[in-house]
Amino acid sequence: MAIDVATDRLAAGVVDAAGEVVVRDRVATPPRDVWPALHRLVRRVLAAVPDHAGQLRSCGVSCEGPTDVVTGVASPLHLPVWRGYELGERVRDLTGLPVALGTAGQARVLAERWVGVARGVDDVIVLLVSDAVEAGVVVNGRLLRGRLGNAGQLGHVVVEPDGLPCPCGALGCLTAYVSAASLEAESNRPLRRAPASLVERAGVMIGRAVASAVAVFDVRVVLLAGAVPAVLGAPLLDAARRELDQRSRLSHLRGGPDRSEHLVELDLTVLGSEAPLVGAAGLARDLAPFGEAPAQL
């Protein structure tokens, strides 16, 4: 069973052992009464699976952070009605299944390593850029989770000291410059009509954050996922690559006789609209249920 909670939509489905979504359903996320909407959605999906009690082994739930994977509590930044929400316990009671909870970024990197372009890649970051901006980081084949399961919050890397205010309360975070909501608010236009200057700046800020991330985690592959790179495409990616090349100068990240070639691959993910559910199922497949402290490297 796979459940994905996002600020714009709720999705639920069933994913098989090959990473194929065999049952799916989704609804728009209501401004209030989010749990009743998710409850009805999950019940519809369960009703579509004959003898689901014998077929479903576990449930993965992906949700924007912060999360607490020990207690199963979620406090999604862009869903204030769910501050300190006991999401894991409620889903467990509803489905009767063990529940693994993770961030949307962590789910997305598991999806890419399961059925996407990162299959066989043991050191990779997937940076999700939508209303939520967060990453999943895999090093030496293991997902980094952290003390409470929030490792990978690259949306709160400071890319402009004393810069724009972020929803987290700090100044200059990546989220303030690249999230779909921030871009639309600043331009007063839909994301697809964002002016070239904002697209360029967003790419620069992504490049700065990625340069910091690859220096810290020593990875060679970084993939961009989510609505922002999907809509803004090549201009955003090109600006991010240029900034990464300028900011990332460590010798082990560069090659060629004069160290002029950047070795980090920065590209877009290829998984489509089913990626969030595949990623949520990846949480159930690869991680322990909530209530157990996440393993540390």
Image (cartoon, rainbow, N blue to C red):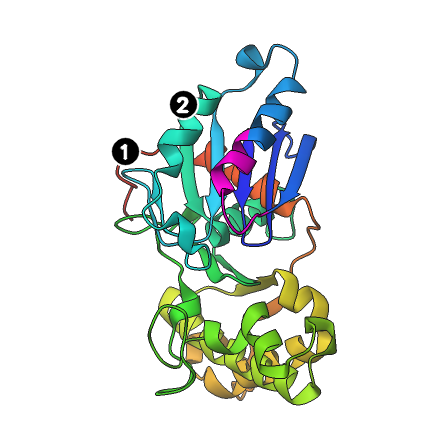
Whether residue 206 is visible here, answered yes or no, is yes
Position of residue 162 relative to residue 81, above or below, is below
Q: Quadrant of residue 249?
A: bottom left
Q: Quadrant of residue 79?
A: bottom left
Whole-percent x and y of residue 37?
56, 37
Position of residue 61 relative to residue 134, above or below, is above
Q: Which residues are magenta?
A: 29-39
**Residue drawn at the location 62% of the way across and 75% of the way down:** 184
Residue behind mark 1: 292
Q: Nearer the viewer, residue 260 or 84?
A: 84
**Residue drawn at the location 55% of the way across and 10% of the way down:** 54
Give the class, few, some or many, for how many residues have Cα within 10 Å of label 2's Cα (few <14, many ≥20): few
- Secondary element at tag 1: loop
**Residue drawn at the location 33% of the way across and 72% of the way down:** 169
- In the image: residue 48, left or right of residue 125: right
Whether residue 281 is visible here, answered yes or no, is no
Q: Based on the picture, tell me whether residue 38 belongs to the magenta stretch.
A: yes
Residue behind mark 2: 93
Tags 1 and 2 touching, CB below 8 Å? no
- Secondary element at tag 2: helix
**Residue drawn at the location 33% of the way across and 76% of the way down:** 170
Position of residue 257 relative to residue 280, above or below, is below
Whole-percent x and y of residue 179?
54, 70
| Three-letter amino acid code of the residue under disc 1 | Glu
Whole-percent x and y of residue 36?
51, 34
| Three-letter amino acid code of the residue under disc 2 | Asp
Whole-percent x and y of residue 44?
63, 25
Q: Based on the picture, tell me whether residue 119 belongs to the magenta stretch.
A: no
Q: Nearer the viewer, residue 4 or 187?
A: 187
Give the class, few, some or many, for how many residues have Cα within 10 Å of label 1's Cα (few <14, many ≥20): few
- Could you tell me how many numbered marks the image carries? 2
